[in-house]
């Protein structure tokens, strides 16, 4: 059975991935902030939430976060100073 993840399911999986890697994170609801909402959806090139921002850069959703994790780019992006 292949089911579509709800926004809550996706958020939980994002949080589990980050917590499992000991990555501190903050959940922000930007739905009522038009400027922030416009910026994050434009920069991430997506409108489906949650949108993950790593070190100030919107990277996309759960699929993109998982790809960053698998390629070790997530750890580099989070733990390597700019």
Image (cartoon, grey):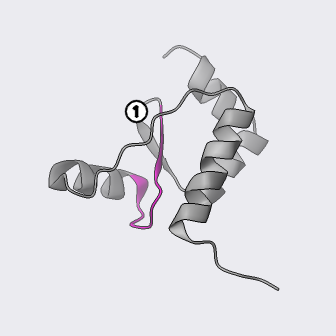
Q: Residue 43: x and y, percent?
A: 36, 51
Q: Which residues are magenta?
A: 44-54
- The answer to whether residue 73 of the structure is visible from this angle is no
Q: Nearer the viewer, residue 25 or 45?
A: 25
Q: How many marks?
A: 1
Q: Eyeballing the image, is 61 above or below 80?
A: below
**Mark 1, residues whose alpha carbon is within 10 Å: few (<14), some, or many (≥20)?**
few
Q: Residue at x 32, y 57 (%)?
A: 42
Q: Is residue 47 magenta?
A: yes
Q: Residue at x 56, y 55 (%)?
A: 11
Q: Residue 16: x and y, percent?
A: 68, 44
Location of mark 1 (residue)? 56
Question: What SS does tag 1 mark?
Answer: loop
Residue 39 lies left or right of residue 81; in this view the side is left
Q: Eyeballing the image, is 31 above or below 1?
A: above
Q: Is residue 7 magenta?
A: no
């Amino acid at each position: 059975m292949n089911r579509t993840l709800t926004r809550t399911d996706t958020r939980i999986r994002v949080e589990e991935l980050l917590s499992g890697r000991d990555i501190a994170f903050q959940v922000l609801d930007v739905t009522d902030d038009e400027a922030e909402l416009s910026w994050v959806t434009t920069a991430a090139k997506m409108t489906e939430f949650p949108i993950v921002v790593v070190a100030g850069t919107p990277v996309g959703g759960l699929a993109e976060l998982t790809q960053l994790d698998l390629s070790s780019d997530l750890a580099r992006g989070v733990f390597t100073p700019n």
